[in-house]
Amino acid sequence: MEMNGNEKDAILIHAIFTLLCGIVLFVFGNIAIGLRLLFLVIIYNIAVLAWGISRKNKDWTNLWLFTFILSIFQVFPDWFLSAQLDILVFPEDGCFKIGTVSGYMAGLWTIPLFIILFIGERVSERISKPAAYFSVAAASLVLFGGSEAFLWLLPSWYAQNVFMIGHVAIYILIPEIILGASAYACYQAVKQQPQWVKIPSAFLVMLVYLGSAAFFYFFIEKIVISH
């Protein structure tokens, strides 16, 4: 199938951003990693929003807005997992903290969430809604699982005091799939609604993720692993 303009734009902007990440993360090693990540997060969000505005693409800007709002709310689950359960660590990295969470996290979640929901939108248009949910679940596992596996190398956040395979905390994989699927479902319900509706909707998705993270931590660590 021939790619449409939205798909070409998405591939181009993420290819450029990937190249920028390589330069910023591996060339400017004398700058604190937290500041480098904060810079990349700001650039990504500005670039995606500016691209949508310049193309007068409301679907693009609506998707960015929802994922950005959700990213801000995602600070709370990270804060809970790090401060209350002590199973997630944000080391001193040169960036300001929101509670125990590195400040760049407030915008970092936008990156995988935008990609995941964008994939879901495209698959839904080209194939079907059931296929879209499958693709969203698969993309969530790959992107979030990949982050679990490799971001500690920077070093950024990392898991502790939980069952892991390599550096991947097993308890969080299902909640991350649920996050992608629930974000996609919620976005489908509100994308044509007034912009303010995205705020409580994104908050609801965050609560679903927080609840599922707490449940699967308890279930896997306290019931399955301990027995």
Image: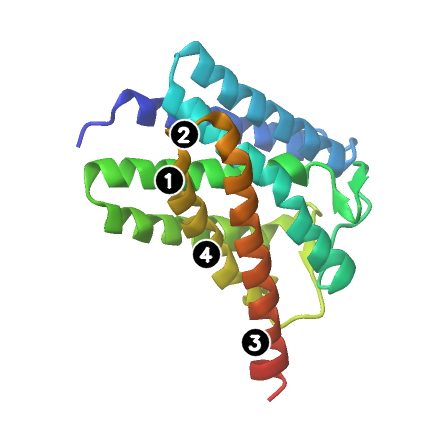
Residue 192 pos. (x, y %): 37, 29
In 3D space, how far apart are the residues under numbered discs 3 and 4 (Cα atoms)? 16 Å
In 3D space, how far apart are the residues under numbered discs 4 and 1 (Cα atoms)? 16 Å
Q: Callout 4: helix, strand or loop? A: helix
Looking at the picture, the colour scheme in use is: rainbow
Of badges 2 and 3, nearer the viewer stands: 2
Q: Foreground: 152 or 214? A: 214
What's under tag 4, amino acid-wise? Ile
Of badges 4 and 1, nearer the viewer stands: 1
Q: Earlier in the sequence, mark 1 or mark 3?
A: 1
Q: Earlier in the sequence, mark 2 or mark 4?
A: 4
Q: Callout 2: helix, strand or loop? A: loop
| Circle 4 residue | 178
Of badges 2 and 4, nearer the viewer stands: 2
What's under tag 1, amino acid-wise? Ala
Q: Earlier in the sequence, mark 2 or mark 3?
A: 2
Q: Does the CB distance between marks 1 and 2 fall below 8 Å?
A: yes
In 3D space, how far apart are the residues under numbered discs 2 and 4 (Cα atoms)? 23 Å
Q: Is residue 213 above or below residue 56?
A: below
Q: Residues within 10 Å of mark 1 (few under 14, many from 20)?
A: few
- Specify whether 76 is left or right of 208: right
Name the residue located 78 percent from the left edge and 57 percent from the top edge. Answer: 83
| Circle 2 residue | 193
| Circle 1 residue | 189
Q: Residues within 10 Å of mark 4 (few under 14, many from 20)?
A: many
Name the residue located 61 percent from the left edge and 65 percent from the top edge. Answer: 214
In 3D space, how far apart are the residues under numbered discs 1 and 3 (Cα atoms)? 31 Å
Residue 12 pos. (x, y %): 40, 23
